[in-house]
Image (tube, rainbow, N blue to C red):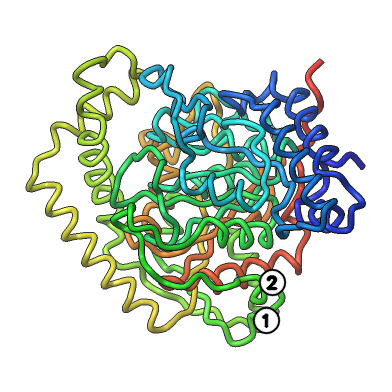
Amino acid sequence: MEPYELSFTEASAMIAAKELSPVELTESSLKRIGEVEPDIHAYVTMTEELALTQARRAEKEIAAGNYKGPLHGIPLGVKDLYDTEGILTTSSSEVRAGYVPDADSVSVQKLTAAGMVVVGKTQTHEFAFGATTPTTRNPWDTSTVPGGSSGGSGATIASGGVTVALGSDTGGSIRIPASVCGTVGIKPTYGRAPRVGVASLSWSLDHVGPLTRNVREAALVMAAMSGYDRRDPASVNKPVPDWTPDLGGSVKGTRIGIPKNFYNERVQPEMWEASMAAANVLEGLGAELVEVEIPLADKVLSTAWTIMLAEAGAYHQEALRATPELFTDEVRTLLEVGEGVLATSYINALRTRTLMQQGWRDMYADIDVLLAPTVPGPAASADDPVFEWAADDIEGATTAYSRVCAPGNLTGLPAISMPVGYTADGGLPLGAQVIGRPFREGDVLRVASVYENATDHIGTLAPLKAAS
């Protein structure tokens, strides 16, 4: 087995025991990225020299007895929305083609302080405004999309380039690529992790978090990224617990909500069946399944898009007016639509979101977590990224993917996507999400971990061969 094939928990244990060097692991990671990158294009910028410098430093620190913990010496992919000091940070857009930050984002600061090794900047749908990441391909089938907007992060984990990569989630952009690339992805409670130094799509919907190969890794990295930072107006000053003790727990008596509406509408049968099979596994382990009605379900997509369009239009207003030709046609059109959103429409959407949050709070009086499909179907075709529900009902993949993920952003609740199976015809990954109560990330991690331990879906690398 090559070092890149190890999960990071396996690699971390070997590094701590001095059975594996961070340099060996980083070199293996860089080699694997080089092998598969011609096929998947997961990276905007590679940082080989920095990575090896950081790996050598980690090796010396560990040899000297200064082991910092399980993240020490582990390679990391950083979504190109996150500022990285002295490293090109383009948001996968010509608008920022020459932007080199003079400081790291808070998340990168925290993770490199914990000893992680930055191997490169992963592709995002331009400014995170989309869910297909057109620059990148899915390692499970390179004719399909890797999801988005954190598509490069999902693709590099699934192909073995790294075991951890950073994402951001405004309408599902961590959970979508996690689902279609067969990885784990966690979005924390809104305000749990600071977004300082991360380009915004929609201030009131943006979350930051990691994509990983398994649940334990998600818990470790999410904890390291979390904490109060007064520079982020949304940041909440709450203690960050150690979630790892929850991972070996039980779901006995846990009330898992099963939606009677919304999440089973315009969803491919295979996706719904895989999610319900996961629910049945958890029920067999002692959980209680409780049917629930999703409140204001008919308002989800319009509310999310109104808020997102208006806030994105405001964020990019100056650049849109100065250099509109530098945006892709898709994103420029969306931003122009955003500038046309009426103030009354935006305010009404904010009011509707408040009603949704109240409705979900009431719903959680009867359940501990909700389990549902992460997205309506597997990876869509890269050439024609749509879902056809009927002859006269064709839905673009970005809308379809974000439609099912958007409630997690509108409510700000913690959510994790986990692999729960594969399509029968093409072997493409299928994912389900577990959504919990505010600041109860431990609940969603525990449920996902118990499912992970009871099955063999999580942690599988795509069978992508090296490019010839």
Q: Picture coordinates of residue 9 (x, y %)?
A: 77, 57
- Eyeballing the image, is 375 above or below 145? below
Q: Secondary structure at mark 1?
A: loop
Q: Residue furthest top?
A: 325
Q: Position of residue 152 (x, y in %)?
A: 58, 33
Quadrant where the C terminus sits is: top right
Residue type, numbered disc 1: Ser
Provide the secondary structure element on which disc 2 rests: helix
Residue drawn where x is 67% and y is 33% of the image? 119
Give residue 248's position: percent from left, percent from top: 72, 75
Residue 8 visible in the shown view: yes
Compared with 240, 74 (above or below) is above
At horizontal 51% and vertical 53% (from top left) the residue drawn is 374
Which residue is at the far bottom?
A: 253
Answer few, some or many: residues within 10 Å of disc 2's Cα (few below 14, many 20 plus, some between 14 and 19): many
In which quarter of the view is residue 241 placed? bottom right
Q: Identify the residue at horizontal 71%, vertical 58% (top origin).
A: 68
Mark 1 closeness class: few <14, some 14–19, many ≥20 residues within 10 Å:
some
Would you say residue 387 is visible in this rendering?
no
Question: Relative to residue 281, is residue 91 depicted above or below?
Answer: above
- Is the Cβ of the residue at disc 1 closer than 8 Å to that at disc 2? yes
What residue does disc 2 label? 450
* Residue found at x 70% / y 80%: 285
Residue under numbered circle 1:
250
Amino acid on which disc 2 is placed? Val
